[in-house]
Image (spheres, helix red, strand yellow):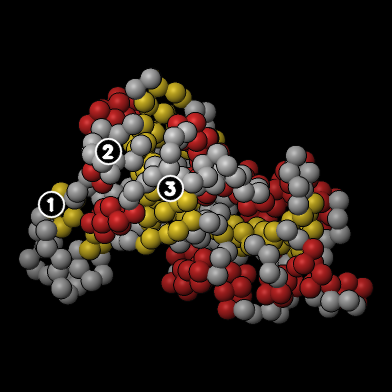
Amino acid sequence: MAHGRILLIVGGGVAAYKALELTRLLRKAGLGVMPILTAAGARFVTPLSLSALAEEKTRTDLFSDADEARMGHIALSRAADLIVVAPATADLMAKAAHGLADDLASTTLLATDKPVIMAPAMNVRMWLHPATQRNLKTLVGDGVAIVGPDIGAMACGETGPGRMAEPDAIFDAIVAALAPPVSGSLKGRHILVTAGPTAEALDPVRVLTNRSSGKQGYAIAAALARLGAKVTLVSGPTALATPEGVTRVNVETALEMGAACRASLPADAAVCVAAVSDWRPDQVFGIKMKKGPGGPPSLTLVENPDILADLSASGPGRPHLVVGFAAETDNLEANARAKLARKGCDWILGNDVSAEAVMGGDENEILLVRDGGVERWERMSKIDVAARLAREIAKVLGGAAA
């Protein structure tokens, strides 16, 4: 059973109904829940519903005589072990990013020194708006952990990123955030992890990239760090927060990622989760390409270095264990087996990304391929996949550290 107190801020949006299920999951796990309901949130769920499930008074008013006689918002922020904002609306994210404090929720966020998790939920256009993306980067830079949003149909009738993560995924992130570091099993080991997409420039504006969110790689880095490993995370462009205890190296291109990986050696293990571009343009235009009467420009692509194969090559600097990922849309097992043989790595984790909810989502279904055979893992959260893989790695790294 988990331990801790969660300050749950429920913003105004249709997804507020999911906060009720999240509250139920938290209480079932033994976690205390102190709800704050914004005025907009109260348009979608009631204080009575939240109070009944949380078994705690729901607070709504910054200027409550009873609650604020002793600066209640300060006491709330200090009493919690973790603050969770679900749904985190565009308005709440903007207030938190800019330090605004005009209601109980935003004032509490500004007054806290505790970790914060936000689960964004909004219309796809609002999520993709440059202002929201700027606020997101600011929040991540301030150490706020972001769960979601998912891609899918929304109440407004549109489909795209902006749908709030499911309660189970938010719950898993909360449990992981509250989990104490587990020392010993990977203590003294150095593990290299790659995560996220790469972005290959076409011109100063456009890039060749992919849909990887980086969530699985970041979860793996966090799980390895909790087992005591020294983790170097080489990351392509993402909006994710750096996991606690992890050293992050930011890159954009496959060439930069390969160089950063080589610079991070020696390592006891390398876990290559990043979705690295197989090709890059042979020429990067110095100015933005324009539409014209001649039609689209002709692009010639050249092959990028194979980072997984390079790390797997035999030699004195090879990590003891090299793990790769195979994101496939068909023939998962056959393609994963072929990749294991072709790359020369020790393990391949195959995952089917043909389903919409995998890339950018919070769950994964893994096929672990190694010389000893194939092991199928049930569908689980990416956080649980990371924890299971970290345990498997810990079983192997029983020798001396690099």
Secondary element at tag 2: helix
Closer to the camera, 20 or 321?
Answer: 321
Secondary element at tag 3: strand
Relative image position of residue 278 (x, y in whole percent): 22, 47
Relative image position of residue 90 (x, y in whole percent): 57, 68
Real-space Cα separation, disc 1 to disc 3, in angstroms:
33 Å
Q: Looking at the image, is mark 2 or mark 3 nearer the viewer?
A: 3
Relative image position of residue 152 (x, y in whole percent): 49, 48
Tell me what residue is drawn at x 30 percent, y 61 percent. Answer: 252
User: Which residue matches tag 3?
Assistant: 190
Closer to the camera, 279 or 262?
Answer: 262
Three-letter code for the amino acid on which mark 3 is drawn: His
Q: Quadrant of the C terminus?
A: top left
Quadrant for residue 207, please give it. Answer: bottom left
Three-letter code for the amino acid on which mark 2 is drawn: Ser
* Label 2 CA crowd tier, 10 Å (few <14, some 14–19, many 20+): many
Nearer-N-terminus badge (1/3): 3
Q: Quadrant of the N terminus?
A: top right
Q: Which mark is residue 325?
A: none
User: Which residue matches tag 2?
Assistant: 312
Real-space Cα separation, disc 1 to disc 2, in angstroms:
22 Å
Q: Is residue 372 left or right of residue 307?
A: right
Quadrant for residue 94, please give it. Answer: bottom right
Number of marks present in the image shown: 3
Secondary element at tag 1: strand
Nearer-N-terminus badge (2/3): 3
Real-space Cα separation, disc 2 to disc 3, in angstroms:
16 Å
Relative image position of residue 95 (x, y in whole percent): 61, 75
User: Which residue matches tag 1?
Assistant: 302
Tell me what residue is drawn at x 20 percent, y 63 percent. Answer: 202
Q: Is residue 38 left or right of residue 302?
A: right
